[in-house]
Image (cartoon, rainbow, N blue to C red):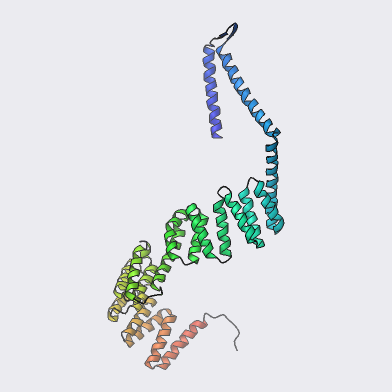
Amino acid sequence: MKKALLLIVVVLLAATFLGRWMAADSGYLLVIRDQWRLESTLGFALLALILGAVALIILTLLGNLAWNLAEPVRATRRFRRGVARRRLKSGFILLMDGELDKAERLLTAAGRDGDWPLVAWLLAAECARQRGDGEALEEYLQNAAKSRRGDSFSGLMRARFALDDGRPAAAHRELKGLVEKAPGNKRILALYADVLERERDWPALCALAPRLRRALGDAYAARRERRAWLARVQQLAQKPGFNDGDSRARELRDLWKQVPSALKQDPAMVARYAGFLAQLGEGSRALSLVKEQLERDWDDRLPPVLEAIDDVSPDELLQNLEKWLVDRPGNAAVLVTAGRVALKARLWGKAQNFFEAAANSSQSATALAELSRLYLALGDQVKAAKVLERRVAELDGQLPDLPLP
């Protein structure tokens, strides 16, 4: 619309300029050919040329329209396309109504003759899918792939059907090729990420994270990437096949170097990595990681890592825990961890104090269980029974109100 208005303004300005120029001096035109002679003003000659050009254009358009209407092949083609459009519309309605056989016949005919073959073949594939005809389904999807930009749509539908049938490996193969052909397609990337997570292919999902971030945004990609790296660390630490703790710890450290910098400061990630290091005999390194992370940002998931450390003296671990309790008195996570570390050091009284403080501060189920077990080991069955009663009373408050005998 803006271009048309601009063109009109330019033509009007040109006409105004030409009119004023001709008004000032109409000019003189003389054409001589043998005995033939033509005299006219320059303005009249230009006007005649313009009118002749306009008439020629109009006659050309009218002649082309008449030819299109009169030519049999094009008329037949237009008729077939009109029929195909009606078939496509009717086939879609029948598909929604569950009339699969009729819908499929109409849609396949629309796919052969219509202007929208891709839509028609995909809808026909849906009909074949609902009828359970795998051979027809594959034929329709292949026909859809031959349409313009149809390979992505047909491949996406094939992958979706494979997932519905419980064949994630087939969906994986299909989507892997589609991701390379259409790296910016959000739907393909999201479905591929779902398949990778379902198959627990964490390295591939981690590698896909940059593409997810560009196509689907930081928030979506960050959630996927975090789950993938957490699972990847756990998968490597618990990988079956060898029992050499040093080799496993070395692989875990190498993997940690590949973790994105932002995730290296995530409390859950640090807790998982440090916990596995502690289990593999890297207690000193695990303790340093926990201390560094807690200095940056406190999180109750980190102190329990110290329970798994066996190659650092319990006294040193208790010193760190007691230091944290000074700043956070009554913290149940630290108190329970301190109690368990005190048990490793065979400091029964100290462990009892920690567990009692944890139970009194938050009624922690873990603290009550540890305290009851410690009382029984010390031979104080009365206190053990009272702790169990407290635990039962705590559970009783969470039970629904039902009639009792």
Q: Is residue 57 above or below residue 179?
A: above
| 275 sits left or right of 115 in the view | left
- Tell me where residue 332 sits by quadrant: bottom left
Q: Residue at point 70% right, 45% down?
A: 83
Tally the marks: 0
Image position, residue 79 (x, y; %): 70, 41
Image position, residue 106 (x, y; %): 70, 52
Image position, residue 121 (x, y; %): 63, 52
Question: Is residue 224 at least partly visible in the picture?
Answer: yes
| 138 sits left or right of 271 in the view | right
Q: Is residue 245 above or below residue 51?
A: below
Image position, residue 109 (x, y; %): 68, 50
Residue at the outermost top position = 35
The image quadrant where one finds the N terminus is top right
Q: Residue at point 38% right, 63% down?
A: 263
The image quadrant where one finds the C terminus is bottom right
Frontmost residue, 149 versus 19: 149
- Tell me where residue 321 sits by quadrant: bottom left
Q: Is residue 30 above or below residue 265?
A: above
Frontmost residue, 229 versus 4: 229
Question: Is residue 189 at least partly visible in the picture?
Answer: no
Q: Residue at point 50% right, 53% down?
A: 185
Q: Is residue 321 above or below residue 95?
A: below
Q: Residue at point 71% right, 57% down?
A: 101
